[in-house]
Amino acid sequence: MAEEDVGEEEDNEVRDPIVDLVSDTGEEDDELSSDAHVNILVESVDAIQEAERRSDMETEEGNLGLLECDKLEAVPEKVEIKFSCVLGDIFHAMDRAKVSTKHEFQKAHYYALMGAFLEWDPNGLAKVRETLLTSTKEWSKEEFDSTLFYKPSLFRKRVQRVALPTNYLYYRVRAVFVTFGEKKDSKTGKPLFNDDAWKKANNLLGEIKRGFCLDPPGFNFYTYEMTDAGEIKKDSHGIPLLRCCWGTNLVECVHRQYNTTFRHKAGIEMGDAQISERRHRHNLDMAQRVYQDFPKVGHYDTWKIDVLQKLVEQNTGKLLYPGWTCVIDYLETDESFVTVP
């Protein structure tokens, strides 16, 4: 952590790791992704904890009065658990209610909202904690807790997070809105939320009740990052690195890919062929990045690998590529991915 030069008289001073993390404005090391919400004001910590207390007390004791707000819909006595096949991007949802980036509570509000939407997996967090505390002397229990609070970017690729069911998620998110919405900036005197932000926050709560912002049951959005050798990628502490497919990040650049695919005029039949080839190559590239032991064959003629796989299996009884699944093992169907006449 970067420390300020406090002079010779204070060189031996024992510094609080929480204060260090709050005041740290330097660049993170090469294992940390950039985090725009590191420098949370110390004064904002109380507000974050207040939002957590509101949510916990409401869900445990049914104290609806803690979440009352005349800018939001009436607090429902009960929120049913609902799942939807249509999912919204959580990070877009968090950014729905626009607030001023210059407001002193903006970063604290975003951090609290992130904690309300996404819950760390307790088992995964415990494993990372044990690894860091036992593998190096640089980490202590206090520094681990403060880093988790002030620099969650360290853990995003190491610990899974889940979006809780609607009966918890609704009250957690509402508690953040109620706590921070009326917080005023000490310089401008303006509240964090204006009328438009309150309107969008209210709409977001309605979407949460309809099940648009939670993890569907039985589906895991996380896979491991893979090395070029097809092995699980790990950091310097031996912690496996995760890859999350939640949200729209993976498809944001698809329009650019289509532009490079069609560099000339093409008819419907040629367009179908080019899109099919693009889809085929994309699926193979993603399989190499996501699936463990998936072979890198250096080309996209997968039918040739199918033939080799079957020949080796018939002659030796072994699989040439154990991580490969042959397309010819599947039955053909009447489904079509091209233009239907």
Image (tube, helix red, strand yellow):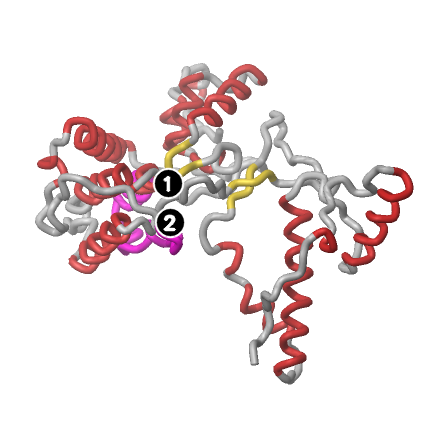
Left/right placement of residue 60 relative to residue 113 reads left
Tell whether label 1 touches label 2 (CB within 8 Å). yes
SS at circle 2? helix
Using the image, determine if residue 36 lies above or below residue 120: below
Instruction: Find the magenta span and give its range.
Output: 84-112
Instruction: Say the numbered circle drawn on residue 90.
Output: 2
State the residue at coordinates (26%, 34%): 48
**Residue 336 appears at what percent x and percent y?**
59, 68
Q: Indicate which label's residue lies in the foreground, 2 or 1.
A: 1
Using the image, determine if residue 17 lies above or below residue 25: above
Q: Residue furthest right?
A: 315
Instruction: Say the numbered circle drawn on residue 130.
Output: none
Q: Nearer the N terminus, badge 2 or badge 1?
A: 2
The residue tagged 1 is 163
Left/right placement of residue 235 relative to residue 301 reads left
Residue 104 on the magenta span: yes
**Residue 154 appears at what percent x and percent y?**
49, 34
Using the image, determine if residue 321 lies above or below residue 62: below
